[in-house]
Image (tube, rainbow, N blue to C red):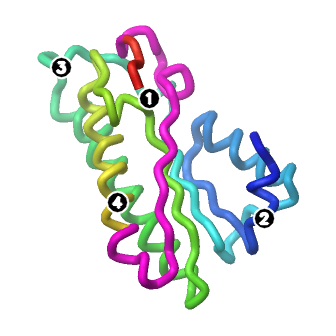
Amino acid sequence: MDTTAVARIDGTVAVVGNGPIALHLRRGLAGAGVDVASDLAAAVFAPWDPAEIRPVPFHELGDDEFHRAWQRTLDDAVTTAVAARARFGARGGRLVFVVPTIALAGGAHHAHWAAAAEGVHLLAKSAARQWGPEGITANVLAVGPAGVLAEPDTAGPVAI
């Protein structure tokens, strides 16, 4: 992790998620001397946990799998963004949404997670447009299948 950019963040950062990416970000931010606490300058949404992101052929997807991937992920992303905005205050802040590249390119056997990730991607765009005038920036960071999928090879090749 490049701690040069991280060290310039004024204030504290909240990292949402329990997967390896979120844990890595928490350790990296803390190692760079950034307070990972409640007064926010930035919020990072990185909920992707390979233990949960298992491949299921599209034609075998049930409501439970789709709900777990789509609805819970989007609900958590919205809750994170709205709560962060409320805590940013007049100085604005930064939202960072981490998504798997399957959001951008699709993923064989991962339609439910690709849909959820693309939903988060679109949410970030909407937050940037709506809250930009308040000094809130929203960015998306795409990570490859190896960082988020239980079986990365099942997603197919990454062409992005």
Q: Earlier in the sequence, mark 2 or mark 1?
A: 2
Q: Amino acid at mark 2?
A: Arg
Please indicate whether residue 120 sits to the left or right of residue 48 in the image: left
Please indicate whether residue 113 sits to the left or right of residue 47 in the image: left
Q: Earlier in the sequence, mark 1 or mark 3?
A: 1
User: Mark 2 and mark 4 in contact (Cβ < 8 Å)?
Assistant: no
Q: Amino acid at mark 1?
A: Glu
Q: Earlier in the sequence, mark 4 or mark 1?
A: 1
Percent across and percent down for residue 84 are 52, 72
Residue at the bottom extreme of this rendering: 90
Which stretch appears magenta?
128-156
In the rendered image, which residue does mark 2 sit on? 8
In the rendered image, which residue does mark 4 sit on? 125
Q: Earlier in the sequence, mark 4 or mark 2?
A: 2
Q: Amino acid at mark 4?
A: Lys
What residue sits 33% from the left and 34% below the top? 104
Alpha-carbon span between mark 4 and mark 1: 26 Å
Alpha-carbon span between mark 2 and mark 3: 43 Å
SS at mark 2 in the image: loop
Q: Earlier in the sequence, mark 2 or mark 3?
A: 2
- Image quadrant occupied by the C terminus: top left
In the rendered image, which residue does mark 3 sit on? 58
In the rendered image, which residue does mark 1 sit on? 52
